[in-house]
């Protein structure tokens, strides 16, 4: 699972600035320049995901690495199943992955299709440690670990969703994601 991850504080700051500009655009606060598209680089995303800001939101998750290819997304990380054991064991499914514990490598790959302000994720390969996991189990797991006071249902990665911030379409290219407004 070890992928070379280029990370820098400068790249993380660059992504934070872009996210603030996108939010201002969405709120109509910045009428001086209308955004038509914004490019997020793989280096910016990985640097941000490794920053203290993002890591505070991802308890039990570390070494996150996102690779973007034309039309495809690959994610690897380490998930400490012991830290999230109560959540993980509540899946109530008969699957070998439920009995795993401790830090485990996770590999996920798939596609993100988007148009007209909506997106859909299609997962085609999911591995948790030594176990191959179905997209249904992975989806339930993501919903459980992403629950919060703001989002008590968690994030359902398997259902179509409205893209945030008035984004109309996401185009994945090698090393970058282009957001269209």
Image: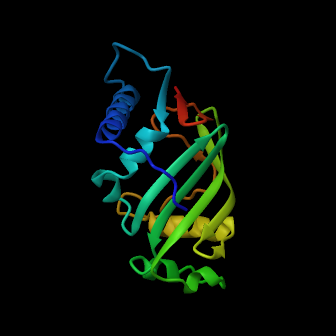
Q: In which quarter of the image is the N terminus?
A: bottom right
Q: In which quarter of the image is residue 43?
A: top left
Vertical comparison of 25 with 41: above or below: above
Q: In which quarter of the image is residue 20?
A: top left
Out of 89 and 175, give the one closest to the viewer. Answer: 175
> What is the count of numbered marks?
0
Q: Where is residue 140 in the image (x, y as percent from the top left)?
A: 58, 69
Give 56 or 136, whichever is nearer the viewer. 56
Residue at the spot x=55%, y=55% of the render?
Answer: 75
Q: Where is residue 2 in the image (x, y as percent from the top left)?
A: 51, 59
Examine the rendered structure and indicate whether residue 14 appears above or below residue 34.
below
- The residue lying furthest to the top in this view is 32
**Residue at 54 percent of width and 70 percent of height:** 141
Residue 119 placed where, x, y %?
61, 43
Decide if residue 129 is on the left or right side of residue 43. Answer: right
Residue 70 % position (x, y): 66, 37
């Amino acid at each position: 699972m070890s992928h070379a991850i280029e990370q820098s504080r400068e790249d993380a700051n660059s992504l934070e600035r872009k996210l603030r500009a996108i939010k201002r655009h969405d709120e109509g606060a910045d009428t001086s320049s209308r955004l038509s598209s914004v490019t997020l680089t793989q280096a910016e995303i990985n640097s941000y995901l490794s920053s203290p800001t993002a890591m505070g939101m991802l308890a039990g998750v570390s070494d996150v690495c996102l690779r973007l290819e034309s039309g495809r997304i690959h994610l690897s990380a380490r998930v400490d199943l012991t830290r999230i054991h109560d959540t993980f064991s509540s899946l109530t499914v008969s699957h070998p992955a439920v009995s795993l514990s401790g830090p485990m490598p996770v590999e996920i790959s798939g596609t993100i299709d988007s148009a007209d302000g909506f997106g859909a994720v299609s997962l085609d390969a999911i591995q948790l440690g030594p176990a191959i996991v179905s997209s249904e189990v992975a989806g339930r797991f993501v919903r459980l670990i992403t629950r919060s006071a703001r989002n008590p249902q968690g994030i359902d990665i398997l259902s179509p969703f409205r893209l945030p911030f008035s984004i109309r379409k996401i185009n994945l290219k090698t090393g970058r994601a282009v957001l269209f407004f």
